[in-house]
Image: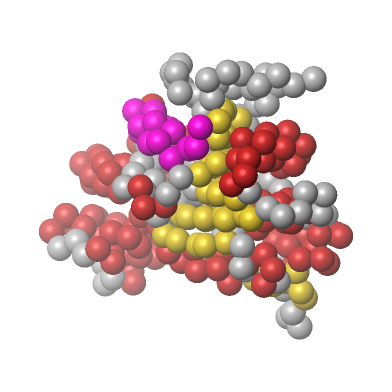
Amino acid sequence: MHTSELDFMIRLLHTRSGLALTHDKQYLLESRLMPIARANGCKDYSELVSLLRTRPTEALLTEVTEAMTTNESSFFRDGKPFEHLRQIILPQLRQNAGARRTLRIWSAACSSGQEPYTIAMTLLEDAVKNPGWKYEIVATDLASKIVDKAKQGIYSQFEAQRGMPIQLLLKYFKSNPDTSWQVKDELRDMIQFRVQNLLTDFSSLGQFDLIFCRNVLIYFDEATKAATIERMCNKLQPNGFLFLGSTESIMEKNARLSQPEGLRGIYQAAVKSLQYA
């Protein structure tokens, strides 16, 4: 691959998805995009780049972008964030909501659906002790194919058991004859799945009490990270919460967000800090 071709693809993917790729990712680019090149009648990677430069279609641009996105996910990923959600964040959100008794939650990079379904299970388990609340979950991702998979809610034996407590698997999933597991309607009905690029306008989604944007910003450059966080702040209710990945943080001091002590990767849109024992 010529340097000019590599530079073109890096710029294209950054513009389309925010991915901040470097020249040492050349092998990754070629390995993921060669099947697309062949499917579009290109004999090699260079012909694909030429096609993208001279006769790009939205379908081809989308296919290329989706091929480069990472869709690693599992139920109850990293564990702690969902413990904090149940033990600390939900009680605070209910207190903030008051008579509204409705909480809106956004899974901003839902991948194949494990995160929003985990959130839904956490809410249903919590509802046993706190009845009378309505929950609305919006789950979005850049890749339309992965959103379709999330909507179906069908997971292999490995995917279903990865991180999932067995009692919740049996309670909220039904087994299929082919050994796969399917999410029950009780969970699926709680979630609205949509295709959404975080670099484009998402004002139509409305306001949220809680936003999950975990393990996404690590793929962005600093300017894109800061801009994305700022726009998400605009979608948070006063005193709402933003969950980032455990290795992610606010790059620059942001006066609109504070970090509750001891809650790694969790930020609050609040004037005063929360105090936890």
Q: Percent x, y for residue 179?
A: 76, 76
Query: Would you identify the image quadrant in which residue 51 lies?
Result: bottom left
Can residue 258 be spotted in the picture?
Answer: yes
Q: Residue furthest front?
A: 99
Q: Percent x, y for residue 102?
A: 60, 50
Seen at 54% across and 25% down, the residue is: 270
Q: Nearer the viewer, residue 125 or 77?
A: 125
Q: Nearer the viewer, residue 92 or 38?
A: 92
Seen at 28% across and 59% down, the residue is: 61
Apparent side of residue 27 relative to residue 185 in the rendered image (left or right): left
Tell me the magenta residue range: 223-238
Q: Residue furthest right?
A: 167
Magenta run includes residue 4: no
Would you place residue 88 above or below residue 6 in this image?
A: above
Q: Nearer the viewer, residue 150 or 107?
A: 107
Q: Percent x, y for residue 71?
A: 53, 53
Image quadrant holding the C terminus, namely: top right
Seen at 21% across and 57% down, the residue is: 52
Apparent side of residue 224 relative to residue 189 in the rendered image (left or right): left
Apparent side of residue 65 relative to residue 134 in the rendered image (left or right): left
Can residue 44 be spotted in the picture?
Answer: no
Question: How would you classify the magenta stretch by its main secondary structure?
Answer: helix
Apparent side of residue 223 relative to residue 99 in the rendered image (left or right): left
